Image (tube, helix red, strand yellow):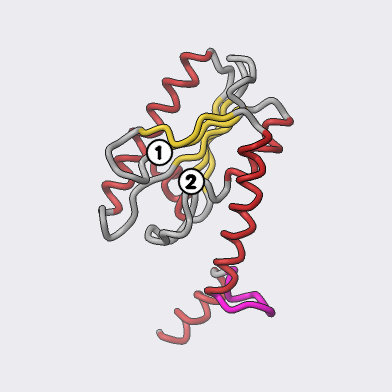
Amino acid sequence: MEAEQSELDILYSPSKWSKRLSGDEIVLKHVEVGLKNAREVQNQVPCNLNIPYGSGTREVYDIFGTDLPGEAPVFIHFHGGYWKEEIITHTSHSFIAKQLYKNKIKSIFVGYELLPKVSVEEINNNATKAVVKCLDYAKSQGSRALYLSGHSVGAQIVARLF
């Protein structure tokens, strides 16, 4: 069984495929590049940052494209991070807001508390609260479409929402 788990770990972990960097190094490089580009986007795209939806320090979201018309579609994204990776936050993937903005799509990047501070069930319940807030925002703006997205664990969170 150990050999099967090891083989699956290799097949399903992009950090195991890097020829130049170790698993830890590639995660750090991914975050570094993402945050550098996210900071640039924050300076280029009108946004509201760190809007709270709960009481936790990570229970916040950022909205990009706040100057777009109310009926603009809204894209909501949940970051990955193995349920517990503190270095990865809602800001980690907000660099994609630039391309969405160019296509007249507002984007919202949602943060959430991590294990072991809270349970997976609490993370999922808080994600529901966040999406309700985002839906309220989209409805108040008269948005014509809504999209949900997630990376890694974020995709699991989005799947659970459905």
What's the residue type where badge 2 is placed? His
Q: Which residue is identified by label 1?
A: 60
Query: Cβ–Cβ below 8 Å for labels 2 and 1?
Result: yes
Whole-number angstrom distance, CA of label 2 to CA of label 1: 8 Å
Residue 47 vs 93, above or below: the answer is above
Point 68% across, 79% down: residue: 20
Residue 131: x and y in percent read: 41, 32
Q: Amino acid at mark 1?
A: Val
Q: Residue at x 52, y 14 (%)?
A: 141
Q: Residue at x 26, y 56 (%)?
A: 117
Residue 17 - label: none
- Which of marks 1 and 2 precedes in the sequence? 1
Circle 2 residues within 10 Å: few <14, some 14–19, many ≥20: many
The reply, left or right, for residue 160 in relation to residue 10 is: left
In the image, what residue occupies the spot 55% across and 75% down? 23
| Residue 69 versus residue 77 in the image, above or below | above
Residue 2 percent coordinates (x, y):
41, 86
- Quadrant, the C terminus: top left
Left or right of 74? Residue 123 is left
**Magenta stretch in the rendered image:** 14-23
Q: Is residue 134 left or right of residue 72?
A: left
Q: Secondary structure at mark 1?
A: strand
Label 1 Cα neighbours within 10 Å, binned few <14 / some 14-19 / many ≥20: many
SS type, badge 2: loop
**Residue 13's x, y, as percent?**
55, 70
Please name whichever residue, 126 or 57, is drawn nearer the observer in this view of the structure. Answer: 57
Q: Quadrant of the N terminus?
A: bottom left
- Residue matched to label 2: 90
In the figure, residue 86 lies in which quadrant?
bottom left
Magenta stretch: helix, strand or loop mostly: loop
